[in-house]
């Protein structure tokens, strides 16, 4: 179980040549949003498939600022996952994405690709402080910081089935 403060920045990027990245992990994720929890927390479950090894997680987040949130996440069983799917927020579509985790200058980036776009992706980086300097990979074209833009949240992207124009 992980609990604590998450500081994360998100960037809209042109989908780079994946062979040019030092990819450490490739993970297929199905993320389903549940009805809101206490304190209007965002709740979700994930089915995570990494090389055929499937696991499930439950996450609850309370957003403090655009880049800072209180997060509580832990693994659950497949049966718990199936039971929680009964609490799905029907206003939000499940998110299907493939995440590529790669290192660049002692920073662990996560690049999320979506089935609806072969040109754009979302690149995330967890930070130790909101002011931390980010050293972007040379071979990734960052279009803009979307950390505080709700139109680029996973829920909004999945529901729209496309990146905003």
Image: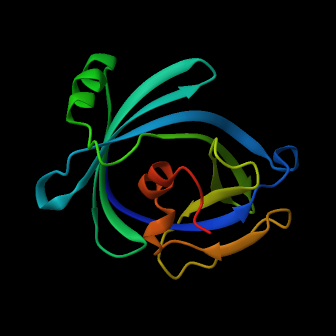
**The quarter of the displayed image where residue 13 is located:** bottom right
Q: Is residue 20 left or right of residue 117?
A: right
Residue shown at 34% from the left, 76% from the top: 65
Identify the residue at horizontal 52%, vertical 35% (top origin).
Answer: 29
Residue 128 located left or right of residue 43: right
Q: Residue placed at 30% from the left, 25% from the top?
A: 81
Q: How is the image coloured?
A: rainbow
Q: Nearer the viewer, residue 94 or 105?
A: 94
Where's residue 67, x and y in %?
43, 72
Residue 132 x %, y %:
56, 78
Of the 4 image quadrants, the one containing the C terminus is bottom right
At which x and y percent is residue 162?
58, 54
Residue farthest along the left direction in this orientation: 38
In-image side of 9 versus 79 (left or right):
right
Q: Quadrant of residue 123?
A: bottom right
Does residue 5 lie above or below 49 as drawn? below
Q: Report the quarter where the N terminus lies.
A: top left
Picture coordinates of residue 106 (x, y %)? 69, 60
Give the camera-side residue of 2 and 11: 11
Number of on-image labels:
0
Residue 101 visible in the current orientation: yes
> Extreme bottom residue here?
131
Determine the residue positioned at 21% across, 46% down: 35
Q: From this viewpoint, is residue 135 visible?
A: no
């Amino acid at each position: 179980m992980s609990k604590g403060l998450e500081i994360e920045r998100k960037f809209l990027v042109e989908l780079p040549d994946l062979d040019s990245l030092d990819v450490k992990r490739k993970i297929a994720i199905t993320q389903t949003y549940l009805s809101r929890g206490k304190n209007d927390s965002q709740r979700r479950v994930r089915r995570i498939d990494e090389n055929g090894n499937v696991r499930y997680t439950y996450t609850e987040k309370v957003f403090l600022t655009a880049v800072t949130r209180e997060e509580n996440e832990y693994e659950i069983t497949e049966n718990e996952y199936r039971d929680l799917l009964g609490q799905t927020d029907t206003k939000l579509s499940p998110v299907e994405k493939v995440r590529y985790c790669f290192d660049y200058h002692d920073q662990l980036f996560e690049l999320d690709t979506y089935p609806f776009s072969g040109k754009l992706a979302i690149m995330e980086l967890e930070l130790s402080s909101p002011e931390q300097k980010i050293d972007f990979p040379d071979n990734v074209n960052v279009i803009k910081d979307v950390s505080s833009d709700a139109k680029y949240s996973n829920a909004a992207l999945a529901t729209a089935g496309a990146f905003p124009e």
